[in-house]
Image (cartoon, helix red, strand yellow):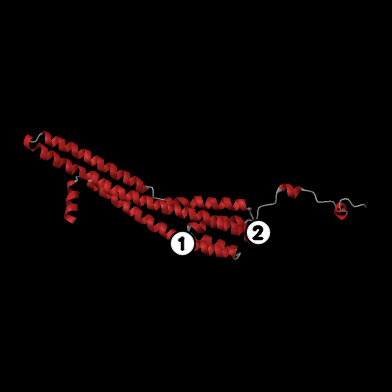
Amino acid sequence: MIETAVRFFQEGGFFMYPIAVVLIIGLIVAAERYIYLSAQKITNRRDFNRLHHMIGGKDLKGALNYATESGSAMASMIGFGLQRLARRQSREEIEYAMEEGLLEVMPRLEKRTQYLSTLANISTLMGLLGTIIGLIAAFTAVAAADPSQKASLLSQSISVAMNTTAFGLMSAIPLLLIHSVLQTKTNEIIDSFEMAGIKVLNLITDGTGARPQAPAAAAARPAEPASRAANPAGSVA
């Protein structure tokens, strides 16, 4: 098996080496992204449970300090909302702040994942390029060969040239599958951020008194006259 793989690689020509480099780079990126996203999922769940418990216990100062010191994506997003809450701002302002925090941490979650699809396309195109160049060299060699050997020489040259296309596809398909898995994992984390933001926002609103302001019409309505309150409708003074 190993000897067959080595022979296959050697017969593919020069372009087998760049494709192998692209595959190695893609696997390194995929491993780094998978480890990072897995660690972020665990850390975000831990920080959310901790902050949810602290906010539920009305320890807002401790929650803000923990969110500032933690440095995780979840803690950063919730920390944006807690900072607005400390300034006695409305629910809408707290919600906008948490959305801003989510937009700030999203690039860290999506970073380098798109490289995998690009590397897969490069691998496929390099395989096709290697095959075309191999075919050009094969037809050039066959043109000057003995007529009795042209058929066998041409078939052998085409077989060797097709190795680069095969290896390019063998590299591209796993990279595309890994890209899909990582993209799904990233979307799950982002969805968990949105759900956590709603839960924390409702907890802040219900537990700390940071409710929306009363409508202006109700605030501007004049008080009922004391004489009218004292004499019900239809009574005679």
Disc on the earlier residue, 1 or 2: 1
Disc 1 packing (10 Å; few <14; some 14–19; many ≥20):
some
Which residue lies most toward the front here? 234
User: Where residue 137 appears, x then y in whole percent?
Assistant: 17, 37
Q: Residue at x 56, y 52 (%)?
A: 97
- Secondary structure, mark 1, is helix
Q: Residue at x 54, y 51 (%)?
A: 99
User: Where residue 155 appears, x then y in whole percent?
Assistant: 14, 40
Residue where numbered disc 1 is placed: 43
Residue where numbered disc 2 is placed: 209
Q: Residue at x 73, y 47 (%)?
A: 217
Task: Look at the image and tell me whether residue 165 can be seen.
Answer: yes
Picture quarter containing residue 204? bottom right
- Amino acid type of disc 1? Thr
Disc 2 packing (10 Å; few <14; some 14–19; many ≥20):
few
- Secondary structure, mark 2, is loop
Residue 134 lies left or right of residue 67; in this view the side is: left
Number of numbered tags placed on the structure image:
2
Which residue lies most toward the right here? 237
User: Where residue 144 appears, x then y in whole percent?
Assistant: 10, 34
Q: Residue at x 65, y 59 (%)?
A: 209
Task: Look at the image and tell me whether residue 108 can be seen.
Answer: no
Which one is in front, 185 or 81? 185
Residue 144 lies left or right of residue 222; in this view the side is: left
Residue 49 lies left or right of residue 153; in this view the side is: right
Which quadrant of the figure contains the N terminus? bottom left
Which one is in front, 164 or 70? 164
Residue 30 lies left or right of residue 46; in this view the side is: left
User: Where residue 19 appears, x then y in whole percent?
Assistant: 26, 47
> For residue 197, which numbered disc appears in the image?
none
Q: CA distance from mark 1 to mark 2?
A: 29 Å
- Amino acid type of disc 2? Gly
